[in-house]
Image (cartoon, rainbow, N blue to C red):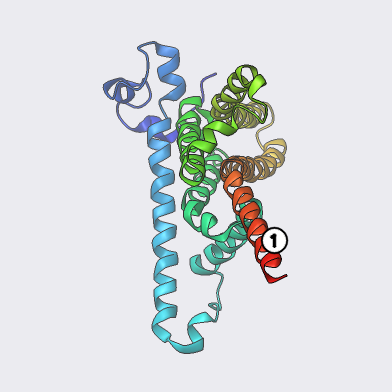
Amino acid sequence: MYHFSWFFLIPGVEHGEVLHALETLPGHAHGELANAHVIPAAWTVFVILTVIALAARSGLNAARAKGGIEQYIPAENLGARNLMEILISGLFNFCENIIGRRDLTMKYFPLLGGIFLYVFFSNFLGVIPGFLPPTSSISNNFAMALVVFLVFNYAGLKENGFNYIKHLAGPMPALAILIFPVEVLSLVLRPVTLSVRLYINMFADHLLLGVSSDLVPLLVPAGFVGLGMFVSMVQAFVFTLLTTIYIALSVAHADHGDAHADDHGHDHDHAHAH
């Protein structure tokens, strides 16, 4: 289905010449038209997030310049600094509760926080009339999911070494030939389900908003705009939640090993004391 986007006013965007020049799409008209908005929309979200980050950093630097206890007092107005502090602290605590270790949360939170903000603002862009969300493109979502796939496997290998691969074979060596392919398949399917889930929800949400706007121009679309804002938040939360869970599952074996070692050491010390 064709949807207007303000980005189509940029020369070469509407009919896909820009994307074709970048060799990002097959040379068929439907695919080009359906995805022509993705790159400019993604860059728009990037610019918005950069401006917000710079504003928040400016407010933080101004607070630090006061020194003493005054630097910890929130600003009187609900500016970029206060909004980002509330959002980041809440999101960090949420991720830390899932991962279970503060050091690992600190290590991977830039990715987790960045994913949440990018997905949310990308989704929210589709609520604004005349804009199409980057997350309504499966290629955009799969690119994010592929990064998640590489990171949580890196985290597992980093924290557990070869035991991360060994764990995929299951606890019984006799069943390893059956369990290992299933576990590997489940890992490979994670980025697919991540990207498809987000794509279907955002495509359906934007399609519903577009159809309602064509049928009833005023009252009904207003309700769907509110619904779209809610869906934008929920889908950003779900994508971030699943990413956090995948990282937590990958590093969990190291935690178990450390806990077992601590228990063993404690028992040893206790026996030695007796």
Left or right placement of residue 215 versus residue 70 in this view:
right
Which of the pair 235/14 is nearer the observer?
235
Figure check: 128 above or below 186: below
Q: Secondary structure at mark 1?
A: helix
**Measuring 42% from the left and 37% from the top, which residue is drawn there?**
41
Residue assigned mark 1: 267
Task: Quadrant for the N terminus, please.
Answer: top right
Q: Residue at x 35, y 21 (%)?
A: 16
> Left of 13 or right of it: where is 103?
right
Q: Residue furthest bottom?
A: 68
Mark 1, other Cα within 10 Å: few <14 / some 14–19 / many ≥20: few
Asked which quadrant contains residue 264, the reply is: bottom right
> Is residue 180 depicted above or below 202 in this figure?
above
- Quarter of the picture containing the C terminus is bottom right
Q: Nearer the viewer, residue 242 or 116?
A: 242
Picture coordinates of residue 124, whole percent (x, y): 56, 43
* Residue type of the residue flagged with mark 1: Asp
Residue 203 appears in the figure: no
User: Residue 129 location in percent, x, y?
Assistant: 54, 38
